[in-house]
Amino acid sequence: MSFKGRVVAVAVLAASALAVAGCGEKVIDTSNIEETLQHNLESARKEKVSSVDCPSDQKVEPKATFTCTVNLSDGKTETATLEIRNDEADVSVIDLREEKAQGQ
């Protein structure tokens, strides 16, 4: 399946992706992004995702990118690259790639 087809349902993850850290600094709500990404990938691809791991304390800076590790139930791992779209912490999936096993 093409990249575009695989992520059509995860193009925008906007549901309450904003949290406030110490000193009033805005950061991505990691658990919300992980849950939303997992749900949307499973729905779009009809494939079980065992877990999603995104970095904590990702500052909300429009145009900044960060990566999340997507672990599939078949043992494969993928890397999702997300871009922060605005100050409200709306994010878009801009890339999703299967990680190659070492030695390949």
Image (cartoon, grey):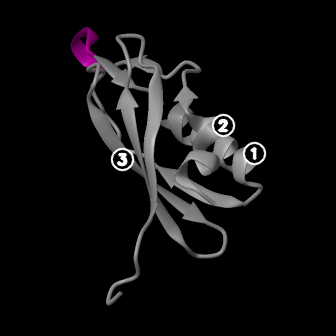
Residue 101 placement, left or right of 65: right
Q: Amino acid at mark 2?
A: Ala
Q: Any magenta on residue 80?
A: no
Q: CA distance from mark 1 to mark 2?
A: 8 Å
Q: Residue at x 26, y 29 (%)?
A: 64
Of labels 3 and 2, earlier in sequence is 2
Horizontal and vertical percent position of residue 90: 46, 20
What residue is disc 1 on? 43
Horizontal and vertical percent position of residue 86: 36, 14
Q: Are marks 1 and 2 in contact (CB under 8 Å)?
A: yes
How many residues crowd mark 1 within 10 Å: few (<14), some (14–19), many (20+)?
few
Check disc 3 and report its element: helix, strand or loop: strand
Which one is nearer the viewer's eye here, 29 or 49?
A: 49
Q: State which quadrant residue 72 falls in.
A: bottom right
Q: Amino acid at mark 3?
A: Thr
Main SS, magenta residues: helix
What residue is disc 3 on? 67
What residue is disc 2 on? 9
Q: CA distance from mark 3 to mark 2?
A: 18 Å
Horizontal and vertical percent position of residue 20: 36, 15
Q: Which span of residues is magenta-colored? A: 21-25
Of labels 1 and 2, earlier in sequence is 2
Q: Residue at x 32, y 90 (%)?
A: 103
Q: CA distance from mark 3 to mark 1?
A: 20 Å
How many residues crowd mark 2 within 10 Å: few (<14), some (14–19), many (20+)?
some
Which one is nearer the viewer's eye here, 55 or 22?
A: 55
Q: Residue at x 65, y 75 (%)?
A: 74
